Amino acid sequence: MTTIQEAVPREPVAVRREALYFAVRNGKLMTGLTIVLALLLLGLIGPLFVAAAPNEYSVQAMSPPTGEHWLGTTTFGQDIFAQFVHGLRATFAVGVIGGGIAAVIGMVVGFVAGYLGGLVDEVLNMLTNIILVIPSLAVLLIVNAYLGIRSVAVQGLFIGLTQWPWAARAIRAQTFSLRTREFVDLARMSGSGTGRIIAREIAPNMSSYLFMTFILLFGGSVLIASSLDFIGLGPTEGVSLGLMLQNANQWSALQLGMWWWFVPPGAAITAIVGALYVANVGLDEVFNPKLRET
């Protein structure tokens, strides 16, 4: 994990422009964003140019990549490129849902606990610690296996409900350091309520921190969803990159030498998570002047 800089008081416009200046010149950030956006674009528009359904059978089984089937076919004649582009869409969807839900819960709990303190902080901190020590993967395994919940949306929901504690603790610590700043005291003296102070004074000064936190939660959600899919607890309808790996493993693609079945989804998952990590490192360098390359 990359170190995220301390939140600072509200930045003037000139400082924000300076951050943008360094952002577009940061190789790590631009490389990571380019890879993620390219795969996202392929997942969004790719299915529009694929005639075959992802699970449609054909007579050309176990075919290597050709002009007709760009990534070859499975042992059942299913077009792997069609599965790949639909799988990208599902993988990004579960990342957005899981990472978004975890980020929202983490921000609410972290902001409220850090700003109010006292008994409220103790109660929320106790709840956070309880969720934090629960083995989230084991919980997700039980939910998926015994409740029969097999959809991308619900999978993302349960991932988000189990991944927020570390984000809440990090945001709480940052809020503690901001609640005693002068601009927060001025807002408090002017009669602003708790919600207004958090939304207009504290959160904007942590915008870079919050965005970087979401990136980490997004990547974590993609990895967890892919793990669940690989062990056969993914969505029962549709396709994802993790399900492609699970099917390739189940039908002995490696033993049969069908590299075109498992290499693309595995490479895509690695590229998404790796690119997010690289982009996060780049953002840290942009927002932290001490880390900027001159």
Image (cartoon, grey):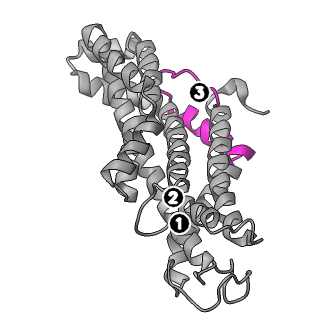
Amino acid type at image mark 3: Ile
Q: Residue at x 39, y 50 (%)?
A: 145
Image height check: is 290 above or below 93? Answer: above
Q: Which residue is mark 2?
A: 91
- The local secondary structure at tag 1 comes to helix
**Magenta-tinted stretch:** 1-30
**Sequence-first disc among 1 and 3:** 3
- Are the residues tagged 2 and 1 within 8 Å (C-beta)? yes
Label 1 – label 3 distance at C-alpha: 31 Å
Decide which of 95, 54 is in the foreground and name it: 54
Disc marking residue 4: 3
Q: Is residue 11 one of those drawn in magenta?
A: yes
**Position in image of residue 135 (x %, y %):** 46, 31
* Crowd around label 3: few <14 · some 14–19 · many ≥20 (10 Å): some
- The local secondary structure at tag 2 comes to helix
Amino acid type at image mark 2: Thr
* Crowd around label 1: few <14 · some 14–19 · many ≥20 (10 Å): many
Image height check: is 45 above or below 104? Answer: below
